[in-house]
């Protein structure tokens, strides 16, 4: 709805051109003074208004995005201990220059020392996650970071309970649940990870293990609205083995039922459960068709351009 009285250059109002130029200048400015900005000037709302001027298809139907469940598809990219300033700039450039499905929520799990750097380079509608955080706000905990710190530098999510934290750093179910409780209390959103090892799967213990891990979370988490659960079969992480779409759906369906039995019907219907474990552009579309898979937590592939195809798996 353009105002007919405004001077325009081939249908683009002078105001819009001015906005584009000022955005470009601000971009230069934030490169010099990133600390002043942390993305606040280009808030998601502001960006939506700005792009609405150009957008021809403002009407996005919810039905095609949510697999009839009403749960918004959510894709996390966990960079793990990878990246440097140059490669992170490249990844951010790829994400900024790609058409990402607007019906998919995207969260980037970035190494802690690059969080501020990535926040200033990533499109603002993408969420930013720490890959770990401690269970208190501050104190004598050398080498740890807190949810308060993550929030302060512009991160809005944290990944907790990843199998690598459990296996390599010996984090217990109980500690992970306490971390989740504290992160939520501090206003962060949490990707809460669960999953069984190969030995556990081969012993037929998959359901027992994920139920035990969910029980620990459930003892501490009372409000699930800012939680996404990531089911990651440990035997499929980084091994190139992927659970088949049917194997993954089976565990996701078990988790839905577990939520009904142990928490509530409402939480079971609304909580998003991601699949993680060697997700690639090649298998993402098949996995995304399953009714109880609400997204992915992607490891190695999130460092590659194919991550864009995974984000757009529902399109």
Image (cartoon, helix red, strand yellow):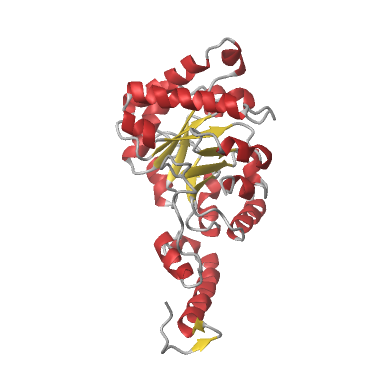
Q: Is residue 282 above or below residue 202?
A: below
Residue 245 placement (x, y as % from top left): 60, 30
Rendering quarter of residue 313: top right
Q: Is residue 64 above or below residue 268?
A: below
Question: Of residues 89 and 310, which is closer to you in this image?
Answer: 310
Rendering quarter of residue 141: top left
Residue 195 placement (x, y as % from top left): 52, 24
Residue 158 placement (x, y as % from top left): 45, 40
Question: Of residues 103 and 175, which is closer to you in this image?
Answer: 103
Does the image show residue 170? yes
Q: Residue at x 51, y 24 (%)?
A: 251
Judged left or right of residue 98, residue 50 is left
Q: Is residue 251 above or below residue 141?
A: above
Residue 138 placement (x, y as % from top left): 36, 39
Q: Residue at x 49, y 81 (%)?
A: 18
Q: Name the image quarter holding the N terminus.
A: bottom left
What is the count of numbered marks? 0
Single out the residue that lies furthest toward the top: 203
């Amino acid at each position: 709805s353009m105002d007919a009285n405004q001077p325009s250059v081939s249908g683009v109002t002078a105001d819009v051109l001015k906005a584009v130029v000022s955005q470009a200048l601000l971009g230069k400015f934030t490169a010099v003074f990133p600390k002043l900005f942390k993305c606040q000037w280009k808030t998601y709302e502001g960006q939506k208004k700005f792009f609405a001027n150009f957008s021809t298809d403002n009407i996005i139907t919810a039905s095609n995005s949510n697999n009839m469940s009403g749960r918004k598809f959510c894709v996390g990219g966990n960079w793990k201990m990878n990246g440097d300033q140059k490669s992170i700039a490249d990844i951010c450039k790829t994400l900024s220059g790609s058409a990402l499905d607007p019906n998919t929520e995207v969260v980037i799990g970035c190494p802690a020392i690059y969080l501020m750097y990535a926040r200033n380079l990533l499109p603002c509608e993408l969420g930013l996650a720490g890959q770990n955080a401690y269970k208190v706000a501050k104190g004598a905990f050398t080498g740890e970071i807190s949810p308060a710190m993550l929030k302060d530098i512009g991160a809005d999510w944290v990944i907790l309970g990843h199998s690598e934290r459990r296996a390599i750093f010996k984090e217990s179910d109980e500690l992970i649940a306490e971390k989740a409780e504290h992160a939520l209390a501090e206003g962060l959103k949490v990707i809460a990870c669960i999953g069984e090892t190969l030995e556990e799967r081969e012993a037929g213990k998959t359901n027992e293990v994920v139920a035990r891990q969910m029980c620990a979370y459930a003892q501490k988490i009372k409000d699930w609205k800012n939680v996404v659960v990531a089911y990651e079969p440990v035997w499929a992480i980084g091994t190139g083995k992927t659970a088949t779409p049917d194997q993954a759906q089976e565990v996701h369906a078990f988790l839905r039922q577990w939520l009904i039995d142990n928490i509530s019907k409402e939480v079971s219907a609304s909580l998003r459960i991601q699949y993680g474990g060697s997700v690639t552009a090649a298998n993402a579309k098949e996995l995304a068709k399953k009714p109880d898979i609400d997204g992915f937590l992607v490891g190695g592939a999130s460092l590659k351009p194919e991550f864009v195809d995974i984000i757009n798996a529902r399109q």
